[in-house]
Amino acid sequence: MTKLLRGKTPLLVGALCCLLVMPAVAAAPEFEIEIRNHLFQPDTLVIPANTKIKLIVYNRDSTPEEFESFELNREKVILGGRKAIIFIGPLAPGEYPFFGEFNPQTALGTIIATDETDAAE
Amino acid sequence: MLLNSVVIVLREVLEAALLISVFMATSRNLGLSNRWAAIALVLGGIGAVVYGYLLGPVSELFDGVGQEVSNASLQLGAFLMLVPTAFQIARRSALSGRHGEILPLLMAATVLLAVTREGAEILVYVSGFWEVSDFLSAVGVGSLIGAGIGLSVGVLVYFLLVALPSKRALAAYGVLLLLIAAGMALQATALLIQADWITVSGAIWNTSAILPEDSLLGQLLYAFIGYEASPSATEVIVYVSSMAVVAVAFVAGRSRVGSGDGDTA
């Protein structure tokens, strides 16, 4: 038993290190939006400027969509009924439009990066 | 819907069509058979169907950034194939009468990877709207028009390159390969940034007020030279250094022939 445990010590130490490091690595604040009937909900998202964020996009439609933004340099296909994780930023303060490439007439939204502290929630 | 389908499919087809036409013109110029292109297109088509079908589960990998990682891998794979391809093209073009088997193989592998990625995206789009019946005609017709325009541009580029005198043609292939390769490396980098596998500290300049990426000129420049209005330092470094790598491969291919020892593959 002790032999077994001794063999696993590096693993345990490794796991402990991971636990200690993980919160720092996964510090990117998370934001969520939905696609419903080819519309983004909400269509405006206020995020902190100069901070990398993790955006989770849920596609509630049965058809695929492509989250796209020239200003954000982002492009990702989200199949029907699935979600996508997209890292964004750090951004300078300003407005960054995004759209659904497969339904560009309706699926429109804007990310607003702001310095104001209440944006971080 | 119709115009949108044209744009979506055109953007995907254009990139692959440019690559294929540059390679096919090179093949013809070097007196190689173009059979590799047919094989690469068929295998790439199969690859696109398989990849498109697996895109859902693939996207879930690596904590939800599997799509970025797999697309970046296909792009990087194509870039890594382009480096020896540039070397071989430069070498063969000065070496009349000696035709190895490696060049068609490299070109086929590059095209296979490019077609798999671009084709999968088109298939996801078209098949996604297949069941929405009233959209189908617009999506179907639009996609065909988009594909038609993309292929036409490819054919045009092919005949322009073939019509060039062979000395000039080599320089043209060199420049086109540099741009295509740098564009691939840049797109792979952008995907890995999006996946948070590469950390960047923000854009180092922003020219979107002067030349927006979504303008017609911006879109064309994106397709040809990978135009990016607000790049990060990492992207600029990757772009410049990937060009340098291909340029070195090209020049090395030339000079090996010049020094007279370029006879074995």
Image: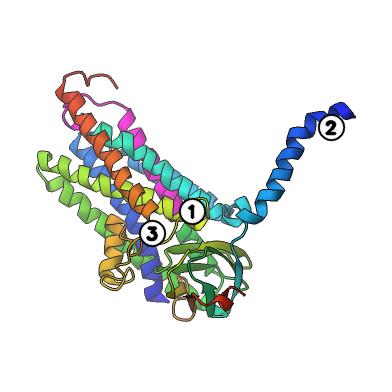
Chain letter of disc 1? B
Residue B12: give its label.
Answer: 3
The residue type indicated by label 2 comes to Leu
Q: Residue B118's x, y, as percent? A: 42, 55
Q: Is residue B65 in view?
A: yes
SS for dot 2: helix
Q: Residue B220's x, y, as percent? A: 27, 63
Magenta segment boundaries in residue numbering = B93-120
Asked whether B103 falls inside the magenta stretch, the response is yes
Q: Residue A25's x, y, as percent? A: 61, 54
The picture quadrant where one finds residue B26 is: top left
- In the figure, is residue B94 to the left or right of B180? left
The answer to the question of whether label 3 and label 1 lie on touching residues, with beta carbons closer than 8 A, is no
Badge 2 is on which residue? A5
Q: Residues within 10 Å of mark 3 (few under 14, many from 20)?
A: many
SS for dot 3: helix
Vertical side of A96 occupied by B164: above or below = above
SS for dot 1: loop
Q: Residue placed at 48% from the left, 77% from the top?
A: A112
The residue type indicated by label 1 comes to Thr
Q: Residue placed at 61% from the left, 60% from the top?
A: A27
Chain letter of disc 3? B
Depth check, mark 3 against mark 1: the one in front is 1
Closer to the camera in the image, B148 or B225: B225
The answer to the question of whether label 2 and label 1 lie on touching residues, with beta carbons closer than 8 A, is no
Q: Residues within 10 Å of mark 1 (few under 14, many from 20)?
A: some
Colour theme: rainbow
Residue B199: give its label.
Answer: 1
Vertical side of B11 occupied by A38: above or below = below
- In the figure, is residue B98 to the left or right of B135? left
